[in-house]
Image (tube, helix red, strand yellow):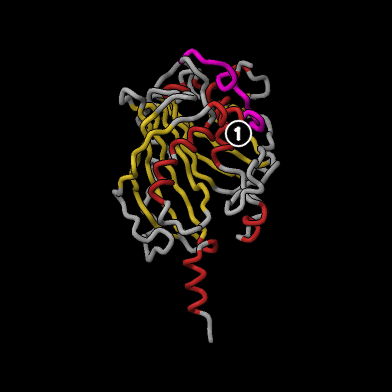
């Protein structure tokens, strides 16, 4: 299937509008996860949440339509998540159409429910536009660190442990069983030599350095994505290919219901060439943390 010729991408008033899709939440029974139906309801959500990286998959074919195949090599998608969705909930992707044939250009993107409610918004670009991406333009330290409990000890500038990573083809095959937008680059060997992974696969590989850093910090707290930016520099990433990954913590803070981290991670190939980078906001629900349960128990009247 040629993703650049999809017939269900409409042009409306200068916008490329995708068809309504109903993304699958494949982790509805993953205990200890925000995607688990029971766990999510305990935390006040309608059900297990669809991961933001899954929604990014829905935008990918429209961005290839907008910028061409080169977007897989030098394209960026930068999203802040506004409203969570649950398994089977219909959403559509919208991209402001760029001027054809131009490089170093950035456009507005978002995704919305059937009633027009935006579930995420941000930017996408190709090359190196003058304006910063949605997440690079965002003030990361808007909320102070306060007295962190889940993330106690986390501080800006902390380096994540570097390690070898890869995306096994089996992980891509798992995504292809449920993906709403199966592009041919995922299915067949590409002109870069191997298959291209989906955004879900990429995010899972690029979050690994942060997970290693967080292993001794999070203490069982349940996390969810607050924002994700994927930036291809010498892309795309390829399956069954070794990469060296690392990253840096940018800011740790809190809101009334969450503690959160902003961080950057990266992946280099075997020659040390930077392939891709990710910026992420990762939230942890206070209500899911034993450290906040202890606090509430100690504050309860005798």
Residue carrying label 1: 93
In the rendered view, does 162 fall on the left or right side of 96?
A: left
Count the marks: how many? Answer: 1
Can you give x and y, in whole percent of width and height, for residue 28 in the image? 66, 47
List the single residue furthest toward the left. 157
Residue 183 within the magenta-colored segment of the rendering: yes
Give the magenta-colored segment's residue range.
175-192
Give the class, few, some or many, for how many residues have Cα within 10 Å of label 1's Cα (few <14, many ≥20): many
List the single residue furthest toward the bottom. 302
Can you give x and y, in whole percent of width and height, for residue 275 in the image? 38, 26
| Label 1 SS | strand
Residue under the image location 61 percent in, 16 percent down: 2
In the image, 211 versus 135, the foreground residue is 211
In the image, 94 versus 148, the foreground residue is 148
In the image, 172 versus 148, the foreground residue is 172
Can you give x and y, in whole percent of width and height, for residue 163 in the image? 36, 37
Q: In the displayed structure, would residue 13 be above or below residue 302?
A: above
Q: In the displayed structure, would residue 68 be above or below residue 244?
A: above
In the rendered view, does 60 fall on the left or right side of 92?
A: left
Can you give x and y, in whole percent of width and height, for residue 300 in the image? 53, 80
Residue 100 within the magenta-colored segment of the rendering: no
Residue under the image location 50 percent in, 65 percent down: 290
Q: Toward which corner of the image does residue 94 lie, by quadrant?
A: top right
Q: Toward which corner of the image does residue 176 lie, by quadrant?
A: top right
List the single residue furthest toward the top. 191
Q: In the displayed structure, would residue 289 be above or below residue 276?
A: below
**Dominant SS type (magenta):** loop
């Amino acid at each position: 299937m040629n993703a650049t010729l999809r017939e269900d991408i409409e042009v409306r008033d200068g916008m490329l509008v995708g068809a309504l899709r109903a993304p699958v939440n494949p982790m509805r029974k993953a205990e200890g996860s925000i995607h688990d139906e029971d766990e999510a309801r305990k935390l006040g959500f309608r059900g297990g949440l669809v991961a933001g990286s899954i929604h990014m998959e829905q935008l990918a074919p429209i961005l290839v339509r907008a910028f061409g195949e080169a977007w897989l090599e030098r394209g960026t998608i930068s999203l802040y998540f506004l409203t969570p969705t649950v398994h089977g909930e219909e959403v559509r992707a919208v991209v402001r159409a760029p001027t054809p044939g131009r490089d170093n250009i950035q456009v507005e993107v978002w995704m919305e429910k059937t009633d027009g409610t935006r579930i995420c918004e941000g930017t996408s670009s190709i090359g190196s536009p003058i304006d910063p991406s949605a997440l690079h333009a965002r003030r990361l330290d808007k909320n102070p660190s306060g007295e962190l409990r889940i993330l106690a000890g986390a501080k800006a500038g902390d380096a994540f442990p570097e390690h070898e990573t890869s995306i096994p083809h089996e992980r891509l095959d798992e995504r292809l069983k449920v993906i709403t937008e199966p592009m041919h680059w995922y299915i067949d060997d590409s002109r870069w030599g191997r298959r291209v992974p989906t955004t879900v696969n990429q995010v899972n590989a690029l979050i690994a350095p942060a997970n290693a850093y967080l292993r001794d910090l999070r203490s069982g707290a349940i996390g969810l994505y607050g924002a994700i930016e994927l930036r291809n520099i010498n892309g795309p990433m390829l399956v069954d290919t070794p990469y060296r990954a690392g990253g840096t913590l940018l800011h740790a803070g809190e809101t009334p219901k969450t503690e959160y981290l902003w961080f950057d991670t990266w992946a280099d190939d075997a020659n040390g060439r930077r392939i891709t980078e990710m910026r992420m906001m990762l939230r942890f629900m206070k209500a899911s943390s034993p450290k906040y349960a202890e606090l509430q128990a100690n504050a309860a009247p005798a």
